[in-house]
Image (cartoon, grey):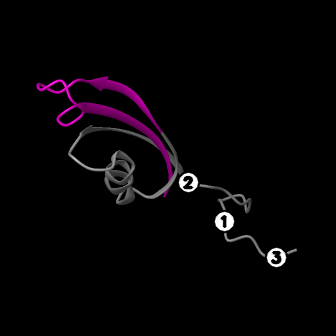
Amino acid sequence: MGQSSLPRGADGSRSLALEAVELELVRRPGPLLEQIQAALAAQGRLLRWAITAVEPGAGGGPEGSRLRIEAVLQR
């Protein structure tokens, strides 16, 4: 078997440094997936994410909506 690239903890075991993050994103025109990925990219390696709340924008369309994103990242 190959060597794992996971860092070792203080006890010598391999471990992941996971972090739960929550952020608000104001929706802009264009593909939503790209906006979410760009907002989370600077935070760490994205493992999973979900939209957990949406506040509609003033115009009633998707642009300007506030999205709450919850994600799990590897640091």
Where is residue 58? Give x, y as percent: 11, 25
Q: Depth check: 42 or 63 in front?
A: 63
**Cβ atoms under marks 2 and 3 closer than 8 Å:** no
Q: Is residue 40 left or right of residue 49?
A: left
Q: Residue at x 22, y 31 (%)?
A: 65
Q: Which residue is mark 2?
A: 17
**Cβ atoms under marks 2 and 1 closer than 8 Å:** no
Q: CA distance from mark 2 to mark 1?
A: 9 Å
Extreme-left residue of the structure:
58
Q: Is residue 36 left or right of residue 16?
A: left
Q: Quadrant of the N terminus?
A: bottom right
- Which residues are drawn in magenta? 50-75
Q: Which residue is mark 3?
A: 2
For the residue marked with disc 2, what is the amino acid?
A: Ala
Q: CA distance from mark 2 to mark 3?
A: 21 Å
Q: Which residue is mark 1?
A: 6
Relative to residue 53, is residue 26 depicted above or below? below
Where is residue 29? Give x, y as percent: 21, 46
Give the class, few, some or many, for how many residues have Cα within 10 Å of label 1's Cα (few <14, many ≥20): few
Relative to residue 29, is residue 15 depicted above or below? below
Give the class, few, some or many, for how many residues have Cα within 10 Å of label 2's Cα (few <14, many ≥20): few
Q: CA distance from mark 3 to mark 1?
A: 12 Å
Q: Residue at x 63, y 66 (%)?
A: 7
Q: Secondary structure at mark 1?
A: loop
